[in-house]
Amino acid sequence: MEQGASYLLQDAADIESILRELERQNSSMTMRQLGGGESVATRLVAVALAHDIFIHAGDADGSGAHYLPGDLLCFDGALDGAGVRFVTSAARNSVSPWPTALAAALPTCIAYFPHQKFIRIGVQPVEACVVRAKRRDGNDFVLDVHDLSARGIGLRSAYVSLQALPVGTVLPAAVLDFRSSGRLLVDLRVVFSRSVQGPDGVINHFGCYYVDLDQARQSLGGLLSA
């Protein structure tokens, strides 16, 4: 994984969102013991919030004897092209209905390595559009829509700071106000941010992906082409 600027996600809801997206996308990950050793391939199979664990399986299957409860494990993976890394401990194995898979405790924080450069999202809206969003802690924002596609949305603001919306932040039920075309609700995840110096001052740019891409595409309907 290429090293660069990283963001530490500590909000439990954001951590859950990242883990569930790794599960949904069936993303490949590597796992190694924190003290060293060979990395093995694995995938996140399920998130079991009721037990404070997640289940993973892959090349590590059958190697549970090497990972005792409490052993610290480092996981590396990727989500929407950005890197994720977290350290957690091995949990009790043989968790039904995954008796041959491995269990690990839910991490308390996740390091998120964003895209190294902005990927332009696509179509510029004809009308001036805005997004009204509220962070999980209750802070709300209004940002201008700069780019649109069936995969994500580009936002910008002269007033919302980069620190207010760190990479990895999930904005649930954000309102996409398309003016005369109507309004839509969609969950967004910030995957990129940067400041750009313009003639009228600094403008902060935020690149967001839809948390549920299939739901977003269905909601957007004929507004955008894939």
Image (cartoon, rainbow, N blue to C red):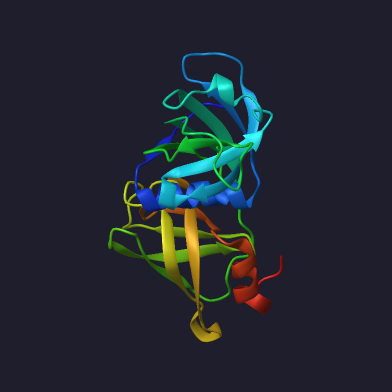
* Front residue of this view, candidates 153 and 1: 1
The quarter of the picture where the N terminus appears is top right
Q: How many marks?
A: 0
Q: Residue furthest right?
A: 226
Can residue 198 be seen here? The reply is no
Task: Find residue 89 and report its horizontal and vertical position in percent.
Answer: 43, 29
Residue drawn at x 52%, y 13% as measured from the top left:
36
Q: Residue furthest top?
A: 36
Task: Find residue 45 and report its horizontal and vertical position in percent.
Answer: 61, 45
Q: Residue furthest left?
A: 138
The quarter of the picture where the C terminus appears is bottom right
Task: Find residue 37 and report its horizontal and vertical position in percent.
Answer: 56, 13
Q: Is residue 160 left or right of residue 60?
A: left
Q: Is residue 103 left or right of residue 226?
A: left
Above or below 212: residue 176: below
Above or below 56: residue 220: below
Residue drawn at x 52%, y 84% as measured from the top left:
182
* Front residue of this view, candidates 15 and 84: 15
Task: Find residue 153 and report its horizontal and vertical position in percent.
Answer: 54, 61
Residue drawn at x 31%, y 58% as measured from the top left:
159
Residue drawn at x 66%, y 77% as measured from the top left:
221
Can residue 104 be seen here? The reply is yes
Above or below 2: residue 100: below
